[in-house]
Image (cartoon, helix red, strand yellow):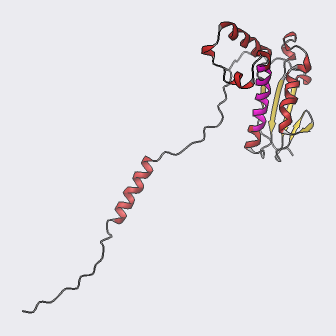
Amino acid sequence: MLKTKRNLDPQVNAGSMADIAFLLLIFFLVTTTIAQDRGLGVLLPPAQEDREPFPLNDRNVCVILVNSRDELLVEGEPMLVKNLRASLKEFIDNQGRDPLLSDSSQEAVVALKTDRGTQYQTYIQVLDEVKAAFHELRAEALGVSLAAYLDFDVKMASPELLQHLEEVKVKYPLRISESSPSSFK
């Protein structure tokens, strides 16, 4: 009555490992959210079909070109991004003349055109400088700092201040024309 001893190998049964890995993969794919780029939030005016384009003189349009090497050309002259705001403030302010005395054909428009190879960061910097020029002129007309103008709360303002703010927005309307990117050197 001799019993034979069985040799048992100490192995782990890995048959269900593939099933577990597959279930974990499905779980993480279902529960993970994928971040999506939202782009820039730009509020466009409502579409008006029967609107005639108002006439513009070339002297009332400031053309800004940004090439594929991220170089600026403002009114045909090379310029650095850091100098753009001061130049635009002078242009928008109508070289010191009162914009309220001019008719609609005398309003300043900033035309921005980029190259297809322009870096997105440069485009954003230029657009920020253009908007900052308008906002600084509005803040100066209100007699407040730029930070106070940007943090302005309409709900807390008096009716007189809101009236003055609307007058300033009429005096310095935010007119930026953006063209589709094209290829130029």
The residue shown at (80%, 14%) is 171
Relative height, residue 8 to residue 109 (above, below): below
The residue shown at (30%, 76%) is 11
Where is residue 54? Give x, y as percent. Answer: 82, 17
Where is residue 135? Give x, y as percent. Answer: 76, 24
How many dots with numbers? 0
The residue shown at (67%, 29%) is 42
Which portion, as a residue range, is magenta?
Answer: 125-139
Q: Main secondary structure of the magenta part?
A: helix
Q: Quadrant of the N terminus?
A: bottom left
Q: Nearer the viewer, residue 54 or 42?
A: 42
Where is residue 93? Give x, y as percent. Answer: 86, 20
Where is residue 80? Give x, y as percent. Answer: 86, 40
Q: Nearer the viewer, residue 86 or 180?
A: 86
Residue 127 magenta: yes
In the image: residue 166, left or right of residue 85: left
Q: Residue furthest top?
A: 160
Relative height, residue 7 to residue 130 (above, below): below
Q: Residue 66's image quarter? A: top right
The residue shown at (85%, 14%) is 99
Q: Residue 44's image quarter? A: top right
